[in-house]
Amino acid sequence: MKAKIADFGGWAMPIEYTGVVDEHEAVRNDVGIFDVSHMGKLTITGNGALDAVNAILVNDINRIGDGQAQYSMLCNPSGGVIDDLIVYRVSTDEIRIVPNASNADEVSAELRKLW
């Protein structure tokens, strides 16, 4: 489909097809799909997993229910963004985090610092 392709975390990822404005309008007016298979996958489990993750992300994970997901960000102690990510609340004892592939190791390291 003549997409512009870029290396992204070792993946050949299409980053643009017909242009940013055209693609934005297509998603706003019809539908868009975002493939997360190229992204990192982290799971936090154990008693208090929800509270621990909730303390370090910018959004309140208590606002979503089990089986739901939310877009959020992980920040450093100075408030700078380490990565934007998707947080899946499986249960209060299991949280899945989907960081960008290129930042998955850094996000994992930051999470390990907190425990």
Image (cartoon, rainbow, N blue to C red):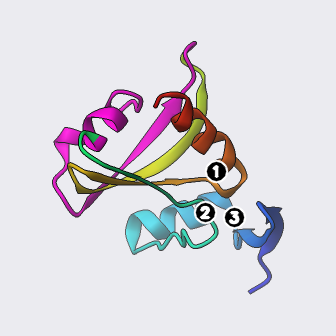
Position of 60 with respect to 37 (left or right) is: left
Q: Residue at x 59, y 39 (%)?
A: 83
Measure the alpha-carbon separation of dots 3 and 1. Answer: 28 Å
For disc 2, the marked residue is: 39
Place of residue 19 in the rendered image (x, y in percent of width and height, measured from the top left): 69, 64
Q: Residue furthest bottom?
A: 1
Amino acid on which the number 3 mark rests in the picture: Gly
Residue to which mark 1 is pinned: 104
Mark closest to the chain's N terminus, 2 or 3: 3
Q: Nearer the viewer, residue 98 or 4?
A: 98
Label 2: how many residues lie within 10 Å, few (<14), some (14-19) or many (20+)? some
Q: Residue at x 68, y 47 (%)?
A: 105
Could you say which quadrant of the image residue 106 lies in? top right
Disc number lying in front (2 or 3): 2
- Callouts 1 and 2 close, C-beta under 8 Å: yes
**Range drawn in magenta:** 49-78
**Relative to 4, does residue 89 appear above or below in the rendering?**
above
The N terminus is located in which quarter?
bottom right
Q: Secondary structure at mark 1?
A: helix
Distance from Cα at disc 2 to Cα at disc 3: 23 Å
Q: CA distance from mark 1 to mark 2?
A: 8 Å
Q: Nearer the viewer, residue 20 or 49?
A: 49
| Amino acid at dot 2 | Met
Q: Is residue 77 magenta?
A: yes
- Is 19 on the left-hand or right-hand side of 70? right
The residue under label 1 is which amino acid type? Ala
Seen from this angle, which residue lies furthest top?
78
The residue beneath circle 3 is 19
Question: Viewer-nearest of labels 1 and 2?
Answer: 1
For the residues labelled 3 and 1, say whether their Cβ atoms are less than 8 Å apart: no
